[in-house]
Image (cartoon, rainbow, N blue to C red):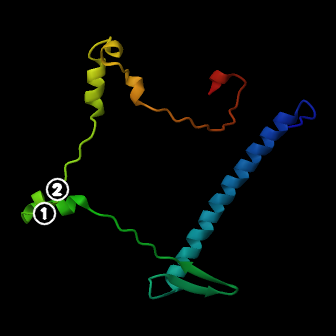
Amino acid sequence: MNHPGPNHIQRLINEYLKSKEFADKANERVDELKTALRAYVKDNGTPDEKGHVWLPAETHKLKNERRVSVSFDSNKAEVWAKENGHWDKIKKTVEMVDEDLLMTLIWKDETSDAVLGVSADDFYSARETWAFKVVEGKNYDDE
């Protein structure tokens, strides 16, 4: 990227901060407007056969869309199965590594690398992500 003039990076930072502030305020306003429109549709709209609520409004139609998510309640199923004598028919045992027991085995002896042929780090993978921040101040330790 071309950097004309010594204040170029500061101008970019200032514009970034102002744009970010504007975007945050715009998103806040969008949320306020959506809340007001939803309330208006709820009070004045007409539900359809799927439970969505519609309201014609000049050149647009407003819609409060009904969304339903369904999830399996394993606790409820377990209680029912136990109460009705079906627990042994529907339960399942899942074998898995107990991380605490594995680490105890590895750390039991400081020479576990030599004894077991592994170290604790062999069982962990790292994932790196980056977050961009503009931090006030000139020292890296200021944050």
Q: Where is 46 relative to 71, above or below? A: below
Badge 1, how many Cα within 10 Å: few under 14, some, many 20+?
A: some
Q: Where is 92 relative to 31, above or below? A: above
Q: Which mark is residue 19?
A: none
Q: Where is 103 relative to 66, above or below? A: above
Dividing the image into 4 quarters, which one contains the N terminus? top right
Q: Judge from the rendering whether residue 135 lies leftward or rightward of residue 92; answer left or right.
A: right
Can you tell which quarter of the image residue 69 is in? bottom left
Residue drawn at x 62%, y 28% as measured from the top left: 143
Q: Which mark is residue 81?
A: 1
First-in-chain label (2 vs 1): 1
Q: Which mark is residue 91?
A: 2
- Residue type pointed to by label 1: Ala
User: Depth check: 116 or 136 in front?
Assistant: 116
Mark 2, mark 1: which one is toward the viewer? Answer: 2
How many angstroms separate mark 2 from mark 1 (CA)? 9 Å
Q: Where is 55 relative to 9, above or below? A: below
Mark 2–mark 1 contact, CB under 8 Å?
yes
Can you tell which quarter of the image residue 134 is in? top right
- Residue type pointed to by label 2: Lys
Badge 2, how many Cα within 10 Å: few under 14, some, many 20+?
A: few
User: Depth check: 52 or 23 in front?
Assistant: 52
User: Depth check: 40 or 98 in front?
Assistant: 98
Q: Judge from the rendering whether residue 52 lies leftward or rightward of residue 9; answer left or right.
A: left
The residue lying furthest to the left in this view is 85
Residue drawn at x 46%, y 32% as measured from the top left: 125
Q: Secondary structure at mark 1?
A: helix
